[in-house]
Image (cartoon, rainbow, N blue to C red):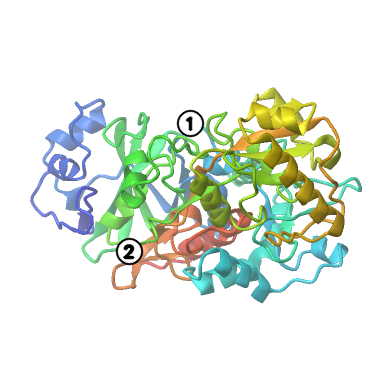
Amino acid sequence: MENMTITETAGLSRRSFITGATVAGALAALGLAGCAPQSPRDKELSATGTAPADISWDEECEVLVVGSGYAGLAAAIEAKSAGADVKIIEKTNRVGGNSAFAAGDMAVCGSKVQAREGIEDSVDAFVSDMLIAGLYLNDKEKCRVIAEKSNETWEWSVEMGCTWDKNENGEPWLYPYGGHSIMRTICQAVDGGGSNVTEPLAAKLGEMGVNVETERMLVQLIQDENGRVIGAVVRDGALDNDVESGKPATIRATKGIVLATGGFGRDLNFRLAQDPRLDETVDCTNQEGATAESLKAAVAAGAMAVHTDWIQLLPFMSPDEQGYGVAAFYTDGQASYAPTLAKATGRRIVNELTDRKRYADAILETGEPCVQITCKKALYGDGLANAMEAGIAHEFNSLEEAAAFYEMPVDAVADEIARYNTFVTNKRDEDFEKPIPDDAQAIDEPPFYGVRLWPKVHHCMGGVKTDLDCRVLDMELAPIPGLFAAGEAAGGVHGACRLGSCATTDCLVNGRIAGQKAAAETVA
């Protein structure tokens, strides 16, 4: 049996080749000690004195996929389609990861939906928009791959049974996402959102004989003496993201491991170390499993981490509800049609269709939640009812009543809305150059509606560095054999700020690539 290295989470760059230590000692070095043995396997690991070179694997597969969101499901399907024996694990108790809660819209270049609307797009334009939003810190070639493969991947998703929102003619439709210079985002239904993608992909995977194994949290990667990743230590039934809880098990992966573990937005201490502004007063849209233990495991295996201090805030969120909630399904749609006003001044602060970083930063700069105001005549979409039911949107008989409710200067609000209405009439925003839609209406008839906006942590641009084949790179920019990553687990793709609706595209495109490449791995 091959010799192996078990990497250590606590030491971010140390590799210890263990020859005479017991597995119990190795697990202690991994941070897996500290809990009493809970099973016969625990007792075996702590009592037999078996050296890591003689480890008895609990399970074996060819490709191990970690995470069951967009990227993980796509990777597992592609690896299985390529003939590999695949195992896919998920740390939470449900399938879909953070993707199941996402809005699910997808940026697609050169789609038949664009062609139907007479919209001309290009890969270069798509890449340019991503670079502008990312402050040119992006991995440009990765952006190009995403753009080039966006349409074939969307078509693939439809083949896999994924569904997308339909217009009155029963056809997919485009949505004007902030930061995109061209309409290219295919809209996802409010009812279901990202689960309209994750559920069909999981069902397809099940038809192929692979079911997602839930409540299995990766805590360590196992390497042989040459640094090749050959397996993982997982914790079954771990509680509250605690790497010392649950029951340990080892999984051998003879071809490779795909990390599709998402970001670390819910990991308060880890994100504070990256951006001290993001303390407990800043909420997060992510599910509770979005923590950093898999990133730490990858770094301990020698992976280069990049851009971990670039954490995207979603500007469309309401401080009057927790988590993702329903705010964005209403406020995001209104951004094209309604102004965002500072509480203290009653004045607009930003082009509401700019990228998320500029929008969020503008709100944060005011120091308190801002207010989006519109009226029934000017409403866009159908998210108001849910926002009203959730208590985050409120109805008013006049602008004066709305301004008073939000403790804003009444005259300033009335003047600013009147000025904004002239932009709507003239189809030209003289203050911030926001594109005014042709169907935009003046905000001048009751009832009026308001909602407070305050950004929340949404997407981590940082993660492990990968190449175009989704191979994880070490500190010398050399691939770590047997280790792949895709989706939010991979850093550097989106630069300083991910362009809206590109996450779905990124995860599906690179998830498929990672699965294909892992299945094609040859082992000497």
Residue 197 percent coordinates (x, y): 66, 45
Crowding at mark 1 (Cα within 10 Å: few <14, some 14-19, many 20+): few
Look at mark 2 in the image and give the residue it sits on: 304
Left or right side of 523 for 435: right
Q: Residue at x 70, y 66 (%)?
A: 181
Left or right side of 359 for 262: left
Please state which amino acid type lies under the numbered disc 2: Met
Discs 1/2, front? 2
Name the mark on residue 233.
none
Q: Residue at x 13, y 54 (%)?
A: 18
In contact (CB < 8 Å): disc 1 and disc 2: no
Residue 421 percent coordinates (x, y): 81, 49
Residue 190 percent coordinates (x, y): 72, 39
Residue 475 is drawn in which quadrant? Answer: bottom left
**Res 196 visible:** no
Please state which amino acid type lies under the numbered disc 1: Asn
- Seen from this angle, which residue lies furthest front? 411
Q: Residue at x 70, y 46 (%)?
A: 339
Q: Residue at x 61, y 71 (%)?
A: 127
Look at mark 1 in the image and give the residue it sits on: 93
Name above or below for residue 39 compared with residue 197: above
- Quadrant where the C terminus is found in the figure: bottom left
**Res 82 visible:** yes
